[in-house]
Amino acid sequence: MQLALFIIFAVLCVVFALNFLFQRHPINSALSLIVVMMSLAVIYWTLGAEFLAAAQVIVYSGAVMVLFTFVIMLLNAGEEERTRGSKIAYIVGIPGVIAVFALLAYTFVHEHSTLGMAHLGGHLNNGVSNLEEVSRILFTDMLLPFEVTSILILVAILGAVVLARKEH
């Protein structure tokens, strides 16, 4: 079942990444990118990285994509023509959502162990949880790249505000 979830969400990720590239409207591209980020979160979850899955949903699918959408709206690149939406969403949308929810429901009901490599309780074989291991690495070995990334995001926000500012 884990392999089926992994394959389904990997295909979903690739399809919406291609949809992101071929969209003509920036908002539709941002929505496709949200689906890619959520699919990556499910892939992380099936691989036993629960913390990374939660961080993917909270940080990337939530905060960063809201920021991208805000910047797209703030820049106001002109009037967009009205469309009826993505053709992929109409063809695959409802049956795809039903199939994914049915597969997830089946997995939750019939799977007695947790998904991925983690054992019950979210602990790995050596007794250290994913959260402990990731936080130890993030705040010791990777502290400088973590802080540099936060500064780069701050600079990007300030740049977007400066570009979008209108002179009177």
Image (cartoon, rainbow, N blue to C red):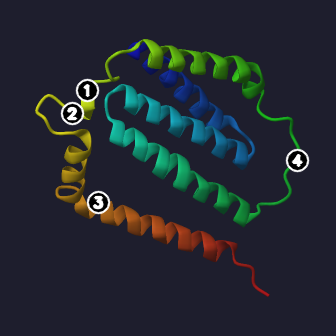
- For residue 75, side relative to residue 127 (left or right): right
Location of mark 3 (residue): 145
- Hey, which residue is sitting farthest bottom in the picture? 168
Q: Nearer the viewer, mark 2 or mark 3?
A: 2
* Label 2 with label 1: CB-CB less than 8 Å: yes
> Relative to 60, does residue 53 appear above or below in the rendering?
above
Q: Quadrant of residue 162?
A: bottom right
Location of mark 4 (residue): 81
- For residue 36, side relative to residue 118 (left or right): right
The amino acid type found where label 4 is placed reads Glu
Q: Where residue 117 appears, x then y in whole percent?
A: 26, 24
The amino acid type found where label 3 is placed reads Pro
Could you tell which of marks 4 and 1 lies nearer the N-terminus? Answer: 4
The amino acid type found where label 2 is placed reads His
| Inter-mark Cα distance, 4 to 1 | 52 Å
Location of mark 2 (residue): 123
Q: Nearer the viewer, mark 4 or mark 1?
A: 1
> Relative to 167, does residue 66 appear above or below in the rendering?
above
- Hey, which residue is sitting farthest right in the picture? 82
